Image (spheres, rainbow, N blue to C red):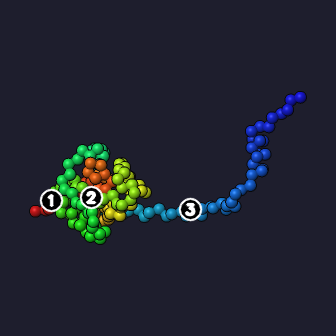
Amino acid sequence: MTRKLPTDFALWEDVARTVKPLHKSKARRKPPAKAEAPPPAAKAPAPGKPIVRPPVIRHDPPPITGLDRRSERRMTRGDVEIEARIDLHGTGIERSRERLLNFLTSSRAEGLRLVLVITGKGASPFSRHTLHGKGHYHAPERQGRLRQLAPEWFHESAFRAHIAGFQPAHPRHGGGGAFYVKLRKRERRAG
């Protein structure tokens, strides 16, 4: 006597009938998209009249664009020449921010391109342990306050006006307690 084996689909249906949902969930439906009116067609300028466009006013400095691959690799290896450095150890948060902004402003005015900002690693139990890589300054065991705030400051508009990119320093230059900061080129003044 041969017994007929159930097909996969029949077997699945038997199992599916015994399953109870864990949570009752209501299917959420998106409201139907409203048909948008096409944008009005631009008028063609009259022949012979120049096109007048309003001037572009830039309120925010350009964003930090980061570093090119070559610079990033050199910094990762520590093969860079640091032109100036600032040590923020033992300085309060507000005073450190002010000193750092003044340092970056004056360094850029002098035409410097690569500076080292030393923040310290903090007093965490792992402060002597040096990790290295792009995102290591976000590691949870590192609790230094200035070290945590410096990347946030670098993204503020006052700092972005001067900074082209930044990266954690190589261990020979301070590792987790320092940042390489690449400054934007000095603006040429119209004369």
* Pointer 3 local density, CA inside 10 Å: few below 14, some 14–19, many at least 20: few
- The residue type indicated by label 2 comes to Ile
In depth, the one of 10 and 109 nearer the eye is: 109
Question: Label 3 belongs to which residue?
Answer: 33
**Which residue is nearer to you in this view: 13 or 139?**
139
Residue at the outermost front position: 125
Eye-nearest disc, 3 or 2:
2
Q: What is the number of callouts on the image?
A: 3
The amino acid beneath tag 1 is: Glu
Q: Is residue 38 visible?
A: yes
Of 62 and 33, nearer the camera is 62
The kind of residue tagged 3 is: Ala
SS at mark 3 in the image? loop
**Residue 8: image location, x then y, percent:** 74, 39
Above/below status of 1 relative to 80: above
Q: Which residue is mark 1?
A: 110
- Horizontal side of 121 relative to 1 (left or right) equals left
Instruction: Please tell me whether mark 1 sits on a helix, a strand or a loop.
Output: loop
Q: Are marks 2 and 1 in contact (CB under 8 Å)?
A: no
Numbered label attached to residue 118: 2
Residue sitting at x 77%, y 41%? 11
Q: Quadrant location of residue 28?
A: bottom right
